[in-house]
């Protein structure tokens, strides 16, 4: 019998596997895909704070980011720039594989191309069943396989009740190296789209949308081609679902849910690596305490949720509020916000404020709303597009 079974070989799952295996626990990871890190869905923009806190990114960083440009629906441009590096673009496939290899060197066992269909919680163990109908037993289990899994719901932990779909494509560029973000309710309804240069002459182009993300991305690719940003609008599109709210409950006896599967994702940007790793750190500590004391009760595992909510709970709440606020804006209102932000120097004030952080958005959101005045006034300006 294993000490811990981990479902999912993304950064959160492999980081927990690395932590536990390095402590000598018998750890096994099940990954439904044949190769770790494929297919690649994430843009791979990681904040400088995350890079500094988790020394796991060696050999995976592609470039530094200290500035990027924002565009309104009418293509009003706003540049955000700081002297210091704010984020890094990493090769997500390389990162996922590097973490998995690190965990395996520590002693973790990986089963690739093996999908977990169900987890049964028994009195003295958990039992995992894979798509090959094989079963595996462990003292505890971690669900870290993304939000699409139905296992948390079957275990009585609920499901994501608000989610979006991301669509992304890797494209050839004409040498443009500036990171750009576009706000347009016709292009990415309720969200935003992006152009992120990665390798020389390559970039990732993508967006979030509640409906028809692939169709919207094709429109964006055509526009970028017309503007000379990319060499061709033809590209293979990959898709990924993103939860905007966390599960109400991320634990029960012998089971912990972490990362995207738990909804530990920034509602403002859809980014989940840093928050997932922070929660993975809490999960690994909780499991170490459980295994060392042979305590696997629901009450004991509740400490996991308490600690991760103390770390990121407020950020998730404020971020979701801001997301819902933006969701109701028209293109005219977004242009209005760009205009008053630029004309009043609000973006410069935020850039100089220590509250502005790549990974922590709550204080900056509250400060920005204070600068902009009553929310009601924003909605009353600009009409409907």
Image: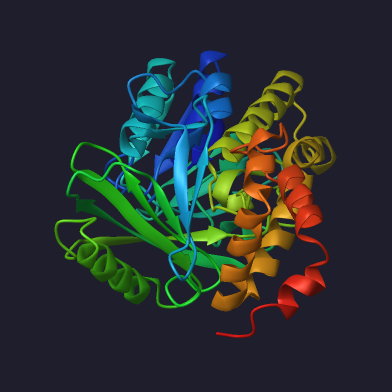
Q: Residue at x 40, y 77 (%)?
A: 212
Q: Nearer the viewer, residue 159 or 27?
A: 159
Judge whether 99 appears above or below 314 on screen: above
Please, which residue is most extreme toward the bottom here?
384
Q: Residue at x 67, y 59 (%)?
A: 245
**Left of 333 or right of it: where is 170?**
left
Judge whether 207 appears above or below 177 on screen: below
Q: Nearer the viewer, residue 6 or 64?
A: 64
Residue 226 location, x and y as percent?
21, 67
Q: Residue at x 38, y 16 (%)?
A: 105
Q: Nearer the viewer, residue 365 or 4?
A: 365
| Residue 1 in view in this figure | no
Residue 278 location, x and y as percent?
63, 32
Which quarter of the rendered picture does the C terminus lie within?
A: bottom right
| Residue 36 in view in this figure | yes
**Left of 126 or right of it: where is 157?**
right
Residue 62 location, x and y as percent?
32, 30
State the image quarter where residue 31 is shown: top left
Please, which residue is most extreme toward the front here?
343
**Left of 27 or right of it: where is 249?**
right
Residue 52 location, x and y as percent?
55, 20
Judge whether 247 appears above or below 290 on screen: below
Judge whether 107 appears above or below 372 on screen: above
Q: Colour mode?
A: rainbow
């Amino acid at each position: 019998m294993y000490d811990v079974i981990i479902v999912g070989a993304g950064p959160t799952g492999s980081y927990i596997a690395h932590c536990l295996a390095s402590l000598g626990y018998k750890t096994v990871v099940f990954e439904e895909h044949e190769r770790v890190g494929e297919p690649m869905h994430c843009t791979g923009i990681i904040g400088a704070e995350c890079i500094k806190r988790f020394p796991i990114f060696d050999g995976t960083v592609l470039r530094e980011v200290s500035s990027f440009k924002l565009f309104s629906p009418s293509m009003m441009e706003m540049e955000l720039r700081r002297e210091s590096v704010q984020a890094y673009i990493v090769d997500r496939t390389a990162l996922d594989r590097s973490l998995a290899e690190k965990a395996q060197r520590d002693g973790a066992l990986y089963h690739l191309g093996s999908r977990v269909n169900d987890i049964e919680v028994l009195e003295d163990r958990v039992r995992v069943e894979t798509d090959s109908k094989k079963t595996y037993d462990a003292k505890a289990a971690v669900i870290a396989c993304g939000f699409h899994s139905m296992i948390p719901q079957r275990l009585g932990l609920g499901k994501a009740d608000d989610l979006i779909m991301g669509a992304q494509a890797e494209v050839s560029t004409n040498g443009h190296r500036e990171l750009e973000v576009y706000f347009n309710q016709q292009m990415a309804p309720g969200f935003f789209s992006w152009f992120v240069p990665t390798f020389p002459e390559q970039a990732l182009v993508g967006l979030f949308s509640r409906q028809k993300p692939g169709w919207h991305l094709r429109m964006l690719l055509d526009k970028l081609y017309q503007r000379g940003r990319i060499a061709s609008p033809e590209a293979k599109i990959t898709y990924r679902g993103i939860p905007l709210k966390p599960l109400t409950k991320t634990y029960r006896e012998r089971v912990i849910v972490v990362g995207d599967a738990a909804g530990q994702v920034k509602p403002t940007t859809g980014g989940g690596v840093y928050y997932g790793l922070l929660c993975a750190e809490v999960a690994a500590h909780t499991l170490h305490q459980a295994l060392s004391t042979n305590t696997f009760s629901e009450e004991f595992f509740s400490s996991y949720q308490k600690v991760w909510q103390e770390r990121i709970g407020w950020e998730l709440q404020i971020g979701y509020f801001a997301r819902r606020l933006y969701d109701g804006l028209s293109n005219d209102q977004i242009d209005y916000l760009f205009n008053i932000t630029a004309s009043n120097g609000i973006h410069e004030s935020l850039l100089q404020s220590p509250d502005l952080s790549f990974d922590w958005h709550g204080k900056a959101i509250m400060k920005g709303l204070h600068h902009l005045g009553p929310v009601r006034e924003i909605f009353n300006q600009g009409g409907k597009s």
